[in-house]
Amino acid sequence: MTELPPPKGVSRFQLRPLLLALLVFDLLVIGLAGWTLANSRRQYLVHAEETTDNLAQVLEQYLLASIRQIDLVLMSVKDEAERTDLPPNAAGIETHLKSQFSRMALLDSLRTTDARGRLVPLDGNDNQAQVDLSQRSFFKHLVQTPQASLYISHPSRDGADGAWVITLARRMERPAGVFRGVIFATVTLEQLTRELAQVNIGKLGSISLRGRDLELLARYPTTNEQDKLIGDTRISGDYLEAVKSGRQVSHFSTRSVLDGQVRTYTFRRMSSPSFYILVGLAESEYLQTWYREAILSGSATLGLVSLSIVLAWMAKATWRKQMDSQAERDHLIQDLTQALAEVKNLKGMLPICGHCKKIRDDQGYWNQMETYISEHTEATFTHGVCPDCAQDLRREMLARRSAPDQS
């Protein structure tokens, strides 16, 4: 009997490596997409750090330039007063004072005091002479420090209508080195905040400026509690660690305690004069492009993974179909084999009697030919008489009838 060929297709042992390969492919695609997005995010973070660092340097240069300009104004009035040795309220000193003040839009006021700390009046306004500034920190420091350079005060409510200001002051002396008063200028912190607002940090970025003792001078954007925060020296978290590190520049990302925004910050320390600058860009803004990349990459990755899952499902469905077909084929082969096994064949040499035509079986018994053939094949017999035998039988019967009765 000829054996049928095995079914063609994917076997169980071939399906497993295929599914494993698809799984490895999915993991590689997901891993590659994750690595690419993580690396891209790091690049955006580095760019944000570079941007905030550049902005902090610009602010530092602006502050230094502004302070130098204010100091030049103070030095100009100081030199004029010391050169002429005129009284602080002399017409020439007053004119020079007004001229210098008009050149500095950043200044809120530019005034002088006498040696006792009384404010020198302008335009002959005697009421101003009653203002005593001898207890102010800048006056006391300059009185006690003959060699003092430019003095920058802590924030105080010394501006018009009690506005927050910082004071920049220099000591004035007579030719013999005798203290004769103070020349000082005030800058409102509101104006300083407006200057910070000119820096492009986005809608959610922030800039803060602190003094030598970490007192808050200005912050943008402003908050409802801005007025209460001025002069506050409390800092925490990464900002505090950056200050403690002693480094001039530090970078960190953290969530703001004021508005809850996560920002990437650059901390910059100024040494002379001593200020602390903090510039931050909001992650939600500088990562907008990265978010779009993440959505596109995630969609592409999801599409590939979904496609591989569909292919795996199709391969498994095909395998199951082949297994069902093979099972059906095996069952058909089994039925056919059984049917073939039940077929009875006669072959070889059969011992048959030459007279009676009986056939001897394997056990030595002589069987009628019909019986033997019926047992060893699927054939059955019906009996009849052939024409020759019928003619012989007819002659025999006639012979018997014509024979005389022997009885």
Image (tube, rainbow, N blue to C red):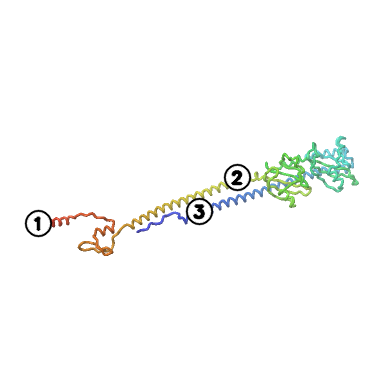
Residue 355: image x %, image y %? 20, 63
Quick check: 201 above or below 369?
above
Residue 180: image x %, image y %? 89, 43
Quote the CA–CA distance across marks 2 and 3.
32 Å
Residue to which mark 3 is pinned: 19
Q: Nearer the viewer, mark 1 or mark 2?
A: 1
Q: Residue furthest right?
A: 176
Q: Nearer the viewer, residue 320 or 275?
A: 320
Q: Earlier in the sequence, mark 2 or mark 3?
A: 3
Quote the CA–CA distance across marks 3 and 1.
97 Å
Q: Classify mark 2: helix, strand or loop.
A: helix
| Residue kind at label 1, given as amino acid type | Ser
Residue 227: image x %, image y %? 75, 40
Label 2 Cα neighbours within 10 Å, binned few <14 / some 14-19 / many ≥20: few
Q: Which image quadrant: the C terminus?
A: bottom left
- Residue that appears at 74% across and 47% down: 235
Q: Is residue 335 visible?
A: yes
Q: Which image quadrant: the N terminus?
A: bottom left
Quick check: 115 above or below 246?
above
Quick check: 385 above or below 292?
below
| Residue kind at label 3, given as amino acid type | Leu
- Residue that appears at 47% across and 50% down: 314
Label 3 Cα neighbours within 10 Å, binned few <14 / some 14-19 / many ≥20: some
| Residue kind at label 2, given as amino acid type | Arg
Residue to which mark 1 is pinned: 402
Quote the CA–CA distance across marks 1 and 2.
124 Å
